[in-house]
Image (cartoon, rainbow, N blue to C red):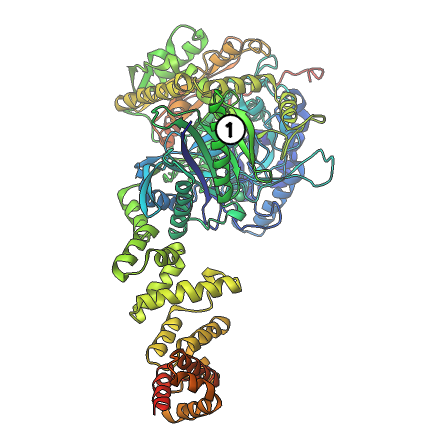
């Protein structure tokens, strides 16, 4: 039987604020356990939360970027469940009023634009982390509350995705939007971006959705895709055998690439939501909304389309450029100085990215600045160095951060355009390769290419290749 | 006059003038507590060393002619659900037996800044859940006017401490009447400020949308003095309002000429004790003599107040008390098998019956499928009750009614019947639901010789007017000057 897969995603992104959502503790990652805590985020008796305005604005920014409707009033709710990493045994979240609702995000799959609707975007607090001792037979666990209270954005999509390609594009696009708006650093390995998938199957052409299965513990985008593939097959097998698929929550086992039941629908937790009495409703007036709106940059998909239209760049190249906002910004800064979009696009997507990969550079702290690359391109345009030499200069620039002119002068890399000097080398090469000259005269045209190569080799690539070609031809033909 | 019997205003003057030395005064109070409190059982802990240290500091300041705070040297007792840095704060619960807060509540910080001397922490119904202080996990506080009677609750320890001269003033908390009702039963002045007037930061939460820290004093002027110190916006409490704090003592003698006093008929119906009713009649006569106009009004949704209150307060409590799980602080069951078992044992052993009852009721009201029928509906009726007051305050300047339907009840009399106990707060609960301020002050005595309290309710943030109205009555009467004759036998511990 053929089935259609229906996927929805819940995304949690830690917001990139310096302090926690309801207290002044630092959100820095990787510190010693329980060094970034205070009575408020430890849920001591008598403490009260105070909203971090920046976190709220970040959430607002994301909600706007995801085309959500923003109500004038938004409220917070308590979500109750017992877990040792949750200091108050309730999480301050949003349930009855979400910060943003009914949004959408356009994703690009196989050059086609699909629209995935966003059910809601809301703000909540992060829990702490359990540390299980490694010793065998330990009858205790430890809790690190450094993360407890870090602002967390939850983005809930509608079940609008139908295959893993769409899911992958959704995750990538969302990640890019969060990075572009600078609301989250989206470091999956630090847990600041996490996904949960809900998957159901229905017969091709059928109207009614099958029972929904939620999958948790997906630690990477790869896990999400693998889990969806696994779950699709598992559900299809059940249905093929005439069984029903239970509505349940399953945990993904990354090592064995399998999912296992965590709890059934009957065991589903009752979170006993009710409005958080310790916080006042937040009023988002038009003025505030406008102030936040202007801080949202052009988003990746729109930027990509503009690059293609205005600069006539290829779809592939623009994808690489807009992948990271910092690269696209780098590109735009360069062409403000020297108007050669295609040239800069090549430099950035080929040479710069290669250097970044080879040298494992942090893209946010590049050793080279747009004006420096622009200077290099200007030098090339003037014909002062060849493109081969230019690559060498570029590599040197990345390593030392020095200006291209300085490197060229210091290493004497300037192009040789002196006819006399080039002729002298040509004479030497001709006399050293009589057999090749013979071949050429017999009509073997590629013998000339070999000779040009020899001249370039002699001049360490610095001879002006155009001049070498002309002078060599003249010399042999003479 | 004995030292203990001065008001805070008088004491403050004598301390500043050097007539009384803070250390001597503090020593005398500690001595008094040690002698008398074994019979009253108002205190859960006495902070002798800290109090004497603070007194010595103030004394030094005075000797050096330095500036001193607004409450220089005035002894105060704090209800044990308000956090005091480095000093036990138990909520009268076994579950917090060993809890020592690492921070001061906002009000405690302000008291310390104004040079008050904190004598100790007072008894209460566990987590402020009760109207008699019988639900304390540690001891039963007695009414200084008659040891067979409860002092009221939940701030019974604070009320009894002020009534028995074991402190000059005290702080309590009022979620459904927990300051006003014990103030009435113990014959002292109790103020529940507007919700948002005093920071709740450091007050261990019971019903977060109802809780408000209040004052116990011997007279109205002292209430004004103490409120002056604790009122005002606090960054750490988002529900505290940035409304300016007026000078409460200035024009406190403004009088009541032309004042419109509302008498809600629903508060004078069947079930009101005859002595209380008569005392209130005298109160109204007095106000009329002073030039006020008494106007009959109606608060039609009053009959729903107790039901609404027990849904909202318990729902919030069930969530507020979820944190006492034995993981991070407080009591943890000594033996358990896994985390869920640890939670269950810790909470079963740590909480008393009334607390457990309310947690269960609250969780039930919030359960999926019941939320709309209980919590949501209660919230809507709460708005109707607020509406009753808004409507009334368009016609009148304040409302006067009894604080408690009875002058008091005996220890054990209502303990077996929670519902009967819940009705003790029938006249005080509506103010918490509406968030308005209220003051209870002595206005008579029952046949048995127990004090009777009257309650004045006003518009949001009109504490100043309430104090003026209360003072107008107090100035003309001497109920507040009557002292209980402590009739304790030494065997009655
Ligand atoms: Zn903190």
Q: Quadrant of the C terminus of chain B?
A: top right
User: What residue do we see at 60% from left, 16% from top?
Assistant: B353
Few, some or many residues within 10 Å of mark 1 (<14, 14–19, 20+)? many
Image height of A447 relative to A320, above or below: below
Image height of B376 relative to A352, above or below: above
Residue B121 shown left or right of residue B395 in the figure: right
Horizontal and vertical percent for residue A246? Answer: 49, 23
Image height of B351 relative to B54, above or below: above
Image height of A387 relative to A266, above or below: below
Closer to the camera, A430 or A317?
Answer: A430
Q: Secondary structure at mark 1?
A: strand
Closer to the camera, B375 or B339?
Answer: B339
Q: Quadrant of the N terminus of chain B?
A: top right
Horizontal and vertical percent for residue A387? Answer: 40, 75
Whether residue B357 is visible to the viewer of this picture, yes or no, is yes
Mark 1 lies on residue: A249
């Amino acid at each position: 039987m053929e089935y259609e897969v229906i996927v929805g995603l819940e995304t949690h992104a830690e917001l990139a604020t310096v302090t926690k959502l309801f207290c002044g503790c630092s959100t820095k990652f990787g510190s010693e356990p329980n060094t970034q805590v205070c009575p408020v985020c430890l849920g001591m008796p008598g403490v009260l939360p105070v909203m971090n305005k920046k976190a709220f604005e970040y959430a607002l920014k994301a909600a706007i970027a995801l085309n959500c409707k923003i109500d004038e009033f938004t409220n917070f709710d308590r979500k109750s469940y017992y877990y040792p990493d949750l200091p108050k045994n309730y999480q301050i979240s949003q349930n009855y009023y979400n910060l943003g609702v009914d949004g959408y995000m356009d994703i690009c799959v196989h050059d086609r634009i699909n629209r995935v609707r966003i059910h809601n975007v809301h703000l909540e607090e992060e829990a702490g982390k359990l540390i299980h001792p490694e010793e065998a037979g330990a009858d205790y666990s430890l809790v690190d509350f450094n993360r407890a209270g870090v602002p967390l954005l939850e983005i809930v999509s509608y079940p609008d995705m139908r295959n893993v390609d769409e899911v992958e594009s959704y995750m990538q696009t969302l990640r890019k939007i969060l990075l572009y708006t600078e609301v989250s650093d989206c470091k999956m390995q630090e847990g600041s971006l996490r996904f949960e998938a809900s998957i159901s199957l229905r017969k091709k052409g059928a109207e009614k959705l099958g029972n929904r299965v939620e999958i948790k513990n997906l630690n990477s985008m790869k896990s999400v895709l693998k889990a969806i593939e696994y779950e699709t097959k598992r559900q299809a097998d059940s249905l093929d055998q005439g069984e029903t698929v239970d509505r349940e929550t399953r945990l993904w086992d990354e090592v064995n690439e399998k999912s296992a039941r965590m709890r059934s629908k009957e065991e589903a937790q009752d979170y006993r939501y009710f409005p958080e009495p310790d916080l006042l409703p937040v009023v988002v007036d038009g003025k505030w909304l406008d102030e936040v709106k202007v801080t949202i940059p052009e988003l990746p998909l729109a930027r990509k389309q503009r690059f293609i239209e205005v600069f006539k760049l290829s779809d592939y190249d623009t994808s690489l450029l807009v992948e990271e906002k910092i690269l696209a910004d780098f590109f735009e800064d360069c062409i403000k100085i020297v108007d050669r979009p295609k040239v800069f696009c090549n430099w950035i997507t080929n040479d710069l990215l290669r250097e970044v990969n080879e040298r494992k550079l942090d893209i946010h702290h590049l050793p080279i600045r747009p004006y420096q690359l622009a200077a290099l391109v200007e030098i090339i345009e003037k014909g002062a160095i060849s493109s081969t030499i230019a690559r060498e200069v570029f590599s040197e620039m990345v390593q030392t951060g020095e200006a291209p002119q300085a490197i060229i002068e210091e290493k004497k890399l300037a192009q040789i355009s002196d006819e006399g000097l080039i002729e002298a080398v040509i004479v030497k090469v001709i006399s050293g390769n009589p057999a090749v000259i013979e071949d050429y005269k017999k009509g073997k045209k590629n013998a000339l290419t070999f000779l040009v190569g020899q001249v370039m080799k002699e001049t360490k690539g610095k001879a002006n290749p155009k001049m070498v070609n002309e002078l060599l031809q003249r010399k042999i033909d003479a | 006059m004995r030292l203990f019997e001065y008001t805070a205003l008088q004491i403050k003057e004598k301390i500043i003038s050097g007539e009384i030395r803070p250390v001597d005064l503090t020593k005398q109070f500690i001595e008094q507590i040690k002698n008398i409190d074994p019979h009253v059982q108002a205190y859960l802990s006495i902070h002798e060393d800290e109090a004497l240290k603070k007194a010595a500091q103030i004394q030094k300041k005075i000797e050096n002619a330095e500036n001193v705070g607004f409450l220089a040297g005035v002894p105060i007792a704090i209800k044990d659900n308000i956090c005091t840095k480095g000093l036990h704060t138990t909520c009268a619960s076994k579950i917090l037996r060993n809890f020592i807060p690492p921070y001061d509540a906002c009000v405690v910080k302000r008291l310390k800044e104004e040079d008050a001397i904190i004598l100790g922490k007072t008894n209460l119904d566990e987590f402020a859940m009760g109207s008699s202080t019988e639900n304390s996990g540690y001891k039963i506080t007695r009414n200084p006017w008659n040891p067979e009677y409860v002092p009221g609750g939940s701030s019974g320890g604070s009320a009894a401490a002020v009534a028995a001269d074991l402190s000059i003033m005290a702080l309590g908390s009022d979620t459904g009447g927990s300051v006003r009702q014990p103030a009435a039963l113990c014959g002292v002045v109790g103020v529940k400020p507007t919700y948002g007037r005093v920071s709740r930061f450091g007050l261990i939460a019971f019903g977060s949308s109802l809780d408000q820290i209040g004052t116990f004093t011997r007279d109205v002027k002292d209430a004004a003095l103490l409120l002056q110190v604790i009122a005002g916006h606090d960054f750490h409490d988002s529900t505290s309002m940035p409304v300016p704090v007026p000078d409460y003592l200035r024009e406190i003698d403004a009088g009541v000429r032309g004042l419109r006093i509302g008498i809600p008929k629903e508060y004078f119906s069947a079930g009101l004790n005859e002595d209380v009713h008569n005392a209130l009649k005298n109160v109204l006569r007095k106000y009329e003599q002073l030039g006020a106009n008494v106007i009959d009004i109606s608060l039609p949704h009053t009959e729903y107040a107790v039901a609404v209150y027990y849904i909202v307060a318990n729902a919030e409590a069930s969530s507020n008390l979820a944190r006492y799980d034995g993981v991070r602080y407080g009591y943890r069951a000594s033996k358990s098998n896994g985390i869920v078992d640890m939670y269950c044992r810790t909470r079963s052993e740590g909480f008393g019956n009334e607390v457990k009852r309310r947690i269960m009721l609250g969780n039930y009201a919030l359960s999926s499928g019941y939320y709309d029928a209980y919590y949501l509906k209660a919230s809507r009726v709460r708005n109707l009750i607020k509406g009753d007051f808004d409507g009334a305050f368009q016609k009148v300047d304040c409302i006067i009614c009894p604080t408690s339907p009875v002058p008091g009840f005996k220890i054990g009399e209502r303990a077996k019947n929670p519902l009967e106990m819940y009705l003790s707060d029938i006249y005080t609960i509506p103010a918490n639901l509406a968030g308005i301020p209220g003051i209870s002050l002595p206005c008579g005595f029952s046949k048995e010789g127990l004090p009777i309290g009257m309650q004045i309710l006003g518009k949001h943030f009109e504490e100043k007017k309430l104090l003026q109205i209360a003072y107008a009555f107090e100035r003309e009467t001497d109920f507040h000057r009557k002292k209980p004759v402590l009739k304790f036998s030494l065997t009655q511990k």
